[in-house]
Image (cartoon, grey):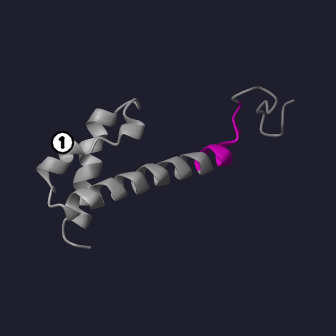
Amino acid sequence: MNTQDGHDRGRLGGVDSYSREWEASLKKRIRTILQDASAEVQAAARTGRCWRPAEKKVKLAKYADWPGNEIARPLVVHRYCALWGRGA
């Protein structure tokens, strides 16, 4: 079924593609990842393992098989060391 703007809303993956639901789902997943990372880095910071040791030892095992994990993980850990390593 074509709409006024000429887009077929009936096809799977059409222009609308439920983008609001996708956005909500991504926000929830990203928030969960960051909360998990924050908790793990906070524990490492309390034992004095920030910066380099935490970047190597905090693995976020729950997300180990996600694409880009090995590249992004040290960056996320570094950012949370900046927060928790200062005693926040």
Q: Position of residue 26 (x, y in %)?
A: 54, 46
In the shown orientation, is residue 9 left or right of residue 36? right
The foreground one among 52 and 75 is: 52
Rendering quarter of residue 43: bottom left
The foreground one among 22 and 66 is: 66
Quadrant the N terminus occupies: top right
Residue position for label 1: 56
For the image, the number of numbered tags is 1
Most extreme residue toward the top, as rendered?
11
Residue under the point 26% across and 45% down: 58
Q: Position of residue 47 (x, y in %)?
A: 18, 61
At label 1, which amino acid type do we have?
Lys
In the shown orientation, is residue 26 left or right of residue 69? right
Residue under the point 79% across and 30% down: 8
Q: Secondary structure at mark 1?
A: helix
Q: Is residue 31 above or below residue 72?
A: below
Q: Is residue 81 above or below residue 71?
A: below
Magenta residues span 14-23
Most extreme residue toward the front, as rendered?
47
Q: Position of residue 10 (x, y in %)?
A: 82, 29
Rendering quarter of residue 63: top left
